[in-house]
Amino acid sequence: MKKILSFFLVGMIGGLSAFGITWFFNKNQNIKVQETQNIVPVNNIQSTVTTLPDFTVAAEKTVNAVVHVKTTYKSQTTTQPSIEEFFFGNPFGGGNQFGQRMPQMASGSGVIISPDGYIVTNNHVVENATDIEIVLNDKRTFNAKLIGRDPATDIALVKVDAKDLPTITYGNSDDLKIGEWVLAVGNPFNLTSTVTAGIVSAKERNINLLRQKQQYAIESFIQTDAAVNPGNSGGALVNTKGELVGINTAIASQTGSYTGYSFAVPVTIAKKIVSDLMEYGAVQRALLGVNIQDIDAKLAEELDLEKPEGVYIVNVNKESAAEEAGIKKEDIIIKINDDKIEKVSELQEKISRYSPGDKIDVWVLRDGKEKKFLVELKNSMGTTDVVSKNVIDVLGASFTELPDKVKEKLNIDNGVKVTDLQAGKLMRAGVKEGFIITHINRKPVKSAKQIEEMLKDIHGGVYIQGIYPDGEVAYYAFGME
């Protein structure tokens, strides 16, 4: 009886304690107990949990069309041969007169875009490669031929001799929205067929990656948080439908490995570059011929603008497409055709879709009024002609003609200035940016177009004379295949 009474008292004490604790908690938290008739049935409560999209279809559509790109290249000492050694060889023997070369290897990724073996990748993956090997997801291997490359966008095109290869369908990067899911497909750390997922974090992102080396660099990256690591370069960025929307190119990292952000070249840019490389072997880059900058809040205030939007023209180049159309210094570009322009990366991306000779409407803001100009775009030579592979790809440079005052200062009658030095014959010969070519094979050079004409049929040695802006005279030699 005592035991029963003890259990009864314990139960009462426990119950009263629980009631007291609940009462105290509710009283101090000002919680009002809801009446029974106001309780909402569980099946009527809307769930806030978002269901993730199914990535399996996109992965299955793309993983077999992304390849492993393995490259071999030869490093070269900085010692350059003398002019005599170049043309007549080293009389003492003992190795290659161009310096001792040691084989090096690197790797990246690529995307098959046609059943007959065209593969797009990054320029930095295949730049200066002597051999390019392609490994498919089914482990078949092929030797690839370099069709062409474009350092300004970091896009390159190679081809293998094969048929009925799996491909990825082009999508439209313009349709991408911030927050949309995307997949990165590639071969990081030599791990084949790796798929990661993330969202689009930003568009038209300029990170000054390419502009450090390229005068005409186009940076309008898609920024994502899909994990991308060394080896992913040249791989595919695809949407949830499995469509190609970008070529993975870079990561923002101080360690060399993924730390949260990755960047891809939009397919709208890559598609134009690939098309040009297929048809011409060189990119037919259209230029307005202006120096530009973004408009920040401070500049907007100085210009008396309501918002910091548009692209400010710092300078208009002589005889450029913009000058001939009537566009002036200090104009503000606000629209290309029907597309609104808010920043430099947007303008560059839009212009990159066109070719020399194409005509576009450029809307500018001048003295508070909108004006429209019909502009016929030009190439880096200042013409609308097709640019051959010789000048852009083999020499690895663009050229501008000299103003008369520069000729007078240097006491020369003619010359063409190297303005955009890239990896190529000139750089490997030791030419530095700013060098003024006055003679090629002892013939005077008077225009940029003349360089192309002088070199297009040359096979063998090329001897260049010139002068630097500080007055230093220099001579260089290299061979044309």
Image: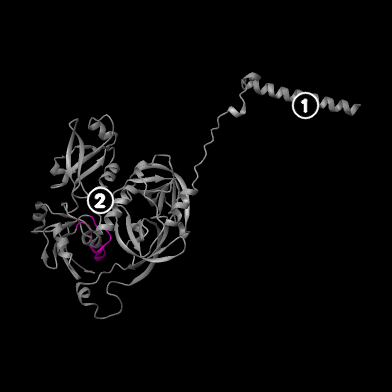
Q: Residue at x 13, y 54 (%)?
A: 402
Query: Would residue 107 appear left or right of 338 to someone viewing this image?
Result: right
Query: Would residue 417 appear left or right of 170 to someone viewing this image?
Result: left
Is residue 397 visible in the rendered image? The answer is yes
Q: Amino acid at mark 2?
A: Tyr
Q: Amino acid at mark 1?
A: Gly
Q: Name the residue furthest right.
A: 1
Is residue 231 visible in the rendered image? The answer is no
Which is nearer the eye, 29 or 112?
Answer: 112
Q: Which residues are magenta?
A: 420-434
Q: Quadrant of residue 345?
A: top left
**Compared with residue 200, is residue 22 higher up or lower down, i.e. above or below?**
above
**Compared with residue 51, is residue 306 higher up or lower down, i.e. above or below?**
above
* Secondary structure predominantly adopted by residues drawn in magenta: loop
Would you name the residue on which mark 2 appears? 216
Which is nearer the eye, 123 or 400?
Answer: 123
Quote the CA–CA distance across marks 1 and 2: 80 Å
Q: Quadrant of residue 292?
A: top left
User: Which comes before the other along the chain, label 1 or label 2?
Assistant: 1
Q: Name the residue furthest front.
A: 164
Image coordinates of residue 296 in percent, x first then y, are 29, 36
Which is nearer the eye, 140 or 27?
Answer: 140
Check disc 2 and report its element: helix, strand or loop: loop
425 in the magenta segment: yes
Check disc 1 and report its element: helix, strand or loop: helix
Image coordinates of residue 60 in percent, x first then y, are 47, 52
Query: Would residue 117 appear left or right of 450 to someone viewing this image?
Result: right
- For the residues bearing labels 1 and 2, Cβ distance under 8 angstroms: no
Q: Residue at x 72, y 22 (%)?
A: 20
Mark nearest the camera among 1 and 2 is 2
